[in-house]
Image: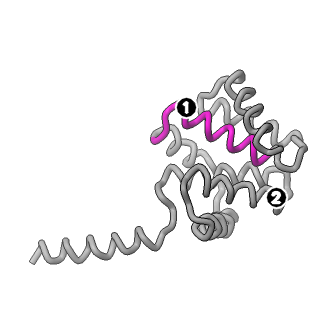
């Protein structure tokens, strides 16, 4: 009896995982940080959202439809989110140092998409460097790589 119940539960949870397009908790956390970079200046620009979708397709092998759905879901849930520190903890737990540098590079790419780095965006990146244990020099290199990709 318990094996049948366990089997039924596993079937239900595997279907739920397929319906949820996020590949993993760490990717969900990255999407949330990318949205934070997009929204921190008070203007959620279309170019920035398109850049995030492009990142999801190129870096995480999402299909364009999956990228669109994940981004829309994260945007809908962004009003409910009151902090990002839990997302940072997930990234620290799940990603190695090089992957965290990649997250910083992706965030810089989102910020640089509109060609302007305002005070709020610069402050966010300084905080992210410290919270993700990325040095200033590593962040500058990541920013330069992101700048070359946004042109």
Mark 1 lies on a secondary structure that is: helix
Q: Residue 10: image x %, image y %?
A: 26, 70
Q: Going 89% across and 45% down the picture, which residue do you hit?
A: 115
Pointer 1 local density, CA inside 10 Å: few below 14, some 14–19, many at least 20: few
Quadrant the N terminus occupies? bottom left
**Which secondary structure dominates the residues rendered in magenta?**
helix
Marks 2/1 in contact by CB < 8 Å: the verdict is no
Spatial CA distance of label 2 from label 1 is 26 Å
Horizontal and vertical percent position of residue 102: 61, 38
Return the residue at label 2: 47
* Nearer to the camera, 107 or 128: 107
Q: Nearer the viewer, residue 129 or 50?
A: 50
The number of numbered discs placed on residues in the rendered structure image is 2
Q: Which residues are magenta?
A: 94-111
Q: Quadrant of residue 69?
A: bottom right
User: Colour scheme used in the picture?
Assistant: one colour
> Which residue appears farthest toward the left when viewing the image?
1
Residue named by callout 1:
98
Check if residue 107 falls in the magenta segment.
yes
Quadrant in the picture for residue 139: top right
Residue 3 shown in magenta: no
At x 71% / y 44%, what residue is drawn? Answer: 107
Res. 28 image quadrant? bottom right
**Residue at the spot 68% in from the left edge and 44% down from the top edge:** 106
Q: Is residue 96 above or below residue 61?
A: above
- Rendered location of residue 38, percent (x, y): 77, 53
| Nearer-the-camera pick, 58 or 76 | 58
């Amino acid at each position: 009896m318990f094996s049948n119940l366990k089997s039924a539960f596993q079937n239900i949870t595997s279907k739920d995982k397929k319906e949820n397009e996020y590949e993993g908790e760490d990717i969900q956390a990255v999407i949330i940080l990318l949205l934070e970079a997009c929204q921190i200046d008070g203007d959620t620009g279309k170019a920035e959202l398109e850049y995030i979708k492009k990142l999801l397709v190129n870096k995480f092998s999402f299909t364009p439809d999956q990228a669109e759905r994940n981004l829309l879901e994260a945007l809908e849930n962004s009003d409910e989110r009151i902090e990002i520190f839990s997302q940072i903890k997930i990234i620290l737990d799940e990603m190695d140092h090089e992957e965290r540098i990649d997250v910083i590079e992706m965030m810089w790419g989102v910020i640089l998409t509109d060609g302007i780095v305002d005070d709020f965006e610069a402050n966010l990146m300084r905080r992210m460097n410290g919270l993700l244990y990325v040095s200033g020099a590593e962040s500058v290199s990541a920013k330069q790589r992101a700048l070359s990709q946004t042109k």
